Image (cartoon, helix red, strand yellow):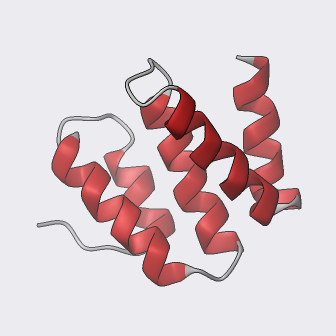
Amino acid sequence: MLQLAKLQRKATSDPAQAIDLALAGHAEFPHGVLFQEREVILVDALVQAGRLSEAKKHARAFVEAYPKSPVISHLRAIAEIDAP
């Protein structure tokens, strides 16, 4: 959990590094229990880095894959995507 907190802080202070760390985590643990949390942080970091189209792509894929996730509304808000 400490790594997740570190990743969350990086999303704001150093979005480029947060993106790299989140993607590395996805590659190492593609089906890990923290995948959803990491993906939300990744979307946030992409937005912070000004990479809105990538953020929207990730957010839409997340919504499609996890339609009942409790973080959907937060993800929609940060990536500025509409509800289906």
Nearest the viewer among 34 and 72 is 34
Count of numbered circles in the view: 0
Nearest the viewer among 64 and 83 is 64
Residue at (33%, 34%) from the top-left corner? 70
Find the residue positioned furthest to the left.
84
10 shown above or below 24: below
Decide if residue 52 is on the left or right side of residue 71: right
Q: Position of residue 66 (x, y in %)?
A: 22, 39
Nearest the viewer among 41 and 78 is 41
Nearest the viewer among 71 and 55 is 55
Quadrant position of the C terminus in the picture: bottom left
Q: Position of residue 9 (x, y in %)?
A: 82, 45
Residue at (39%, 61%) from the top-left corner? 58
Residue at (50%, 24%) from the top-left corner? 34
Find the residue positioned furthest to the front.
28
Q: Position of residue 29 (x, y in %)?
A: 50, 25
